[in-house]
Amino acid sequence: MRQFPAALLFFLCLISATSGHNITKILAQFHEFSKFNDYLSRTHLASEINRRTTITVLAVDNAAMDDILAKNYGIYEIKNILSLHILLDYFGAKKLHQITNGTALAATLYQTTGSAPGTSGFVNITDEKGGKVSIGADDNGGVLDASYVKSVKELPYNISVLQVSKILNSPSAEAPAPAPTEQNLTAVMTKKGCKLFADQLTATGAEKTFVDAVSGGLTAFCPTDDIWTKFVPKYKNLSADHKVSLLLFHGVPIYQSMQGLKSNNGPMNTLATDGAASYSVTVQNDGEQVTLKTKAVTAKITGTIIDEDPLAVFSIDKVLQPKELFAGAPAPAPAPEEADSPSPSSAKVAAGPASDSPDDAPADDSANDNGSVTIRGGLLGFVITVLLVVVV
């Protein structure tokens, strides 16, 4: 029987241990969470949870779900409310009681939607006396109205499912919410520091292409105002059509979450792609840092403006410059004889007139401008000839 190296066996075990989780299957084992589980699927939050590698889900039982469903919220309000129960960090039962200084603010999926003003997308977790852990939305006036009940499932440090006593109250999350396809894209960008880029989308008409793409999935990369300001001199030199192409180059016609970008390295077509004009950008990772590379520039993703299927918008630290507009064809390398040739004046003295032979083969000798002869043949042949003459 063939023996596998210990290192290989360890690697295979590691792959198995870090395989993806499925929140739907986890919660399906517990009937008391059936309604919470159902709405994670209806709102597409389940797929977002599954594609992330570090996540904590604050689950509520059916009785707690009945309380929120009785208020007749629309599906997108429910989505915002439940997204507040999905923490973008790992909190197991043990960690809840080991929080530095006894309290922590945790970012949530609601914070990534672009609809959460200020710190309303954060949850306050406080370890209190007697082992009680209280939890509340940061925009709830400081009231921690829910508490930790028990650990449902933990896969350190991948996913943790914890039961909390009730739905977290949040005026922002409960406010009327438009469907993602109805989001005002430029308004979202403007709100998050990309006003100048958004203004150009509107001014050039490129905004319509972005908006039309949202229903089928869109990922956009938005240079912040300070970055765009530095780029303006180059932008002004572009023609009207090239300005539109550059703006469309900042959109990818599929939805990619941050985790999706981290796991799908390689070239991606953009909204500017048109047949032979590839206008593609290459996604690469350096640890947790995602970079976007073109032939002309490498940009880093610096933040999430909105990340809610089917729309994701990320801020970047450089304007993406397509090779079609900014990376001209390289100048041809000089031929070896050109690179090593002497200066024009010395070449005239040494080389003499050009050969008339069909293959341009150099002659053994030629006359220079002064009528003298320059030896061009091999020195060895000349010496042998002299010796033969002497001998004869």
Image (tube, rainbow, N blue to C red):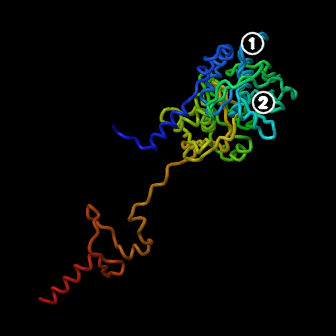
- Determine whether, in the image, residue 163 is placed left or right of residue 127: left
Instruction: Tell me whether the residue at label 2 lies in contact with that at label 1, contact meaning CB atoms closer than 8 angstroms.
Output: no
Most foreground residue, 292 or 117 = 117
Q: Residue at 79% of width from left, 24% of height from top?
A: 147
- Determine whether, in the image, residue 312 is placed left or right of residue 273: right
- Percent from the top left, x then y, of residue 140? 85, 26
Query: Of the residues shown, which amino acid type is indicated by label 2?
Result: Val
Q: Measure how far apart labels 2 and 1 are at the Cα level.
A: 22 Å
Picture quarter with the N terminus: top left
Pointer 1: what residue? 63
The correct choice, above or below, for 68 with respect to 155 in the image is above
Residue 345 in sight: yes
Pointer 2: what residue? 123
Picture quarter with the C terminus: bottom left
The numbered mark at residue 97 is none
How many numbered marks have been drawn onto this rendered protein structure?
A: 2
Q: Residue at 64% of width from left, 43% of height from top?
A: 300
The correct choice, above or below, for 18 with respect to 65 in the image is below
Q: Which residue is the extreme one toward the right? A: 141
The correct choice, above or below, for 284 with respect to 111 in the image is below
Q: Residue at 84% of width from left, 32% of height from top?
A: 129
Most foreground residue, 179 or 241 = 179
- Percent from the top left, x then y, of residue 162? 70, 25
Task: Quadrant for residue 75, please give it.
Answer: top right
